[in-house]
Image (cartoon, rainbow, N blue to C red):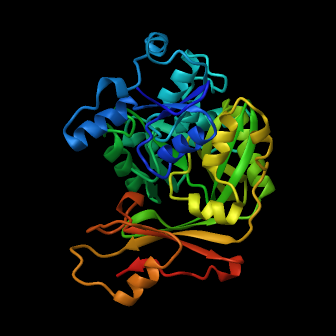
Amino acid sequence: MSLSGDGSSVAIVVDPTCEYLGQLFVEELEARGVRTVSVLSDYMAAGLAGQFGSTPPAELVAPAAGEEAEWWERTCQMPLLGAVSESDAGIATAERLASALGARFANDVSPRRRHKWLLHETLRRAGLPACAQRLCATGDEVRDMELPVVVKPARGVASDGVSVCHTVSEAVAAVEALRGAERYGGGSNERVLVQSLLVGDEYAVDTCSRAGDHKVVAVWKYDKRPTNGAPRVYYCSELASSFGALEAAVVAALDATGHTDGPTHTEVIVTDTQGPTIVEINARFHNQKFVPLAERCLGITQIQAAAAAMLEDDDAWRRVPASPTLACAGRLVHLVSCVEGPLRALNGDLWRELSSLPTSDERSTSTPTLAGSSSPGTATRLTPTTAGLSATSTTSS
């Protein structure tokens, strides 16, 4: 366990491996007088061991189930405000620690927000729009479903392992490809989730909650397109104006699934038949480099709002707006590669233009873009109005 900062209360941050997400949240909490405990989930610890060839020290890994109280008594002995995870894999760990240690701000321990099939069954029982769906143990079980369908892991992250299928043969093959495969967060796909394809504009709604009081801090409109044989490749994430029906749908879903505390990043598709329909709820921060854009366009970030929600004093939380207001237009542009192989030369003028943008995330890739992990990078685009956000070219060919 890593305990840092000064103060009379403490918060746990699980898997703070990213400098612009979890580590920034730690800094924000400590700047507000909250001490922090940073720990790794088992899944993240195993991943780091595999990547670097060395197992993280035991004191940096979260305690096993049933050992939380002894661990806390031995190492901290301070009132716990709450626990937040940077990673999807660490959400269950954060929920378990907060519940076992009697945190002031804690969600119930439940898989219904993380498991996509359970999520949609929960929404359906609450009378909210949900996908037609089935958990399939074999490819044959998808044959009588109405097409098109989306085949995905029931527990997954981003677009990894997701296939859009328009024929029975495509759907059967997609199920068989995922069945038994290792899944994100640990374990394997014993059954594969098949859902009806939602058609419409896709949004992400970032929220923070405190004791059941939900506030929307950002609304993003996604631009995803079929590219390089992948069904949905990110081209940009654009900040959108406040959207009442969309925000209301997300708040209703948070209430239905029992989310009361901490950040969420919820993906929604607005269909012609059902209206705003939840795709998934992620009880974590928006997993992009959104802070510079949010600061300029909204005046507040999800990181700041989550820290305000964690404080014992109510004043900081009261100052967080209930809904976002755009001061200017902004877009996160995702660079897309359509070629494969080593980079032999650069267009100097274009590189200087890209590097001059307010923020850029430089990466390298030698393969075509199929998902966020294989994107060459991102760039931020800011203008006074949305009219200035022209159709920026983001592809290389």
- The image position of residue 171, as x and y in percent, is 41, 51
Q: Residue furthest left?
A: 53
**What x and y, as percent, mark residue 348?**
34, 88
Q: How many marks?
A: 0
Quadrant containing the N terminus in the rendered view: top left
Quarter of the image for residue 314 reads top right
Which sits in the foreground, 272 or 96? 96
Q: Describe residue 315's horizontal placement relative to residue 61 as left or right.
A: right
**Residue 144, can we see it?**
no
| The C terminus - image quarter | bottom left
Q: Is 76 located above or below residue 315 in the figure?
A: above
Residue drawn where x is 57% and y is 18% of the image: 78
Asked if one can make out residue 307 in the rendered structure from this viewpoint, the answer is yes
- Residue 330 lies, in percent from the top left, at 63, 70
Where is residue 228 drawn, in percent x and y? Answer: 36, 70
Q: Which of 106 and 125 is in front in this view?
A: 106
On the picture, is 229 further left or further right than 105? left
Quick one: 253 or 125, which is closer to the camera? 253
Residue at figure coordinates x 47%, y 44% from the top left: 23
